């Protein structure tokens, strides 16, 4: 049980596990369940959430950079739809006499 991990050690752990899985004929990314608890803690402490850790190790391709922009646009559309709905609901209904 190694207690003093470094960022490089965490990357090596992930890469070694990935190679081990590939050589065993298993075509998947390393999962948290493949590691001991203390290894998981170290990996997440140095490399962030599990998907980002796999990206940092070069195992998983980086996520799309446009994602943040798409999310921003989606929130703007949703807000515009909510405000339009409120305007429609609150619009004064005038009747001709």
Image (cartoon, grey):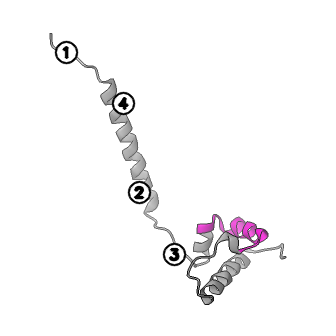
Q: Quadrant of residue 2?
A: bottom right
Which is the main secondary structure of the residues drawn in magenta?
helix
Query: Which stretch did the figure color magenta?
Result: 35-51
What crowding class fits label 1: few (fewer than 14 Cα within 10 Å), some (14-19), or many (20 or more)? Answer: few
- The answer to if 91 sits in the magenta stretch is no
Residue at 73% over, 78% down:
9
N-terminal of the pair, mark 4 or mark 3, is 3
Mark 1: secondary structure: loop
Left or right of residue 55: residue 86: left
Marking on residue 95: 1
SS class of the residue under badge 3?
loop
The residue carrying mark 4 is 86
Q: Quadrant of the C terminus?
A: top left
Q: Nearer the viewer, mark 1 or mark 3?
A: 1
In which quadrant will I find the N terminus?
bottom right
Residues marked 1 and 3 touching at CB (< 8 Å): no
| Residue 70 image point, x, y percent | 41, 57
Mark 3 touches mark 2? (CB < 8 Å): no
**Circle number at residue 81:** none
The label shown at residue 61 is 3
Q: Does label 2 or label 1 sit earlier along the sequence?
A: 2
Q: Nearer the viewer, residue 40 or 77?
A: 40
Cβ atoms under marks 2 and 4 closer than 8 Å: no
As measured in the structure, the alpha-carbon distance from the residue carrying label 2 to the one carrying label 1 is 43 Å
Task: Residue under label 2, please give it.
Answer: 70
Based on the displayed image, in which of its 4 quarters is residue 71 positioned? bottom left
């Amino acid at each position: 049980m190694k207690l003093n991990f470094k960022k490089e050690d965490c990357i090596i752990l992930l890469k070694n596990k990935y190679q081990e899985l590939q050589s065993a004929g298993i075509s998947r990314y390393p999962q948290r369940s493949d590691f001991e608890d203390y290894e998981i803690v170290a990996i997440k402490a140095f490399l962030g959430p599990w998907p980002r850790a796999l990206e940092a190790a070069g195992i998983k391709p980086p996520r799309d950079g446009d994602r943040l922009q798409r999310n921003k646009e989606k929130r703007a559309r949703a807000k515009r739809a909510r405000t339009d709905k409120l305007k429609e609901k609150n619009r004064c209904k005038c009747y001709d006499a």
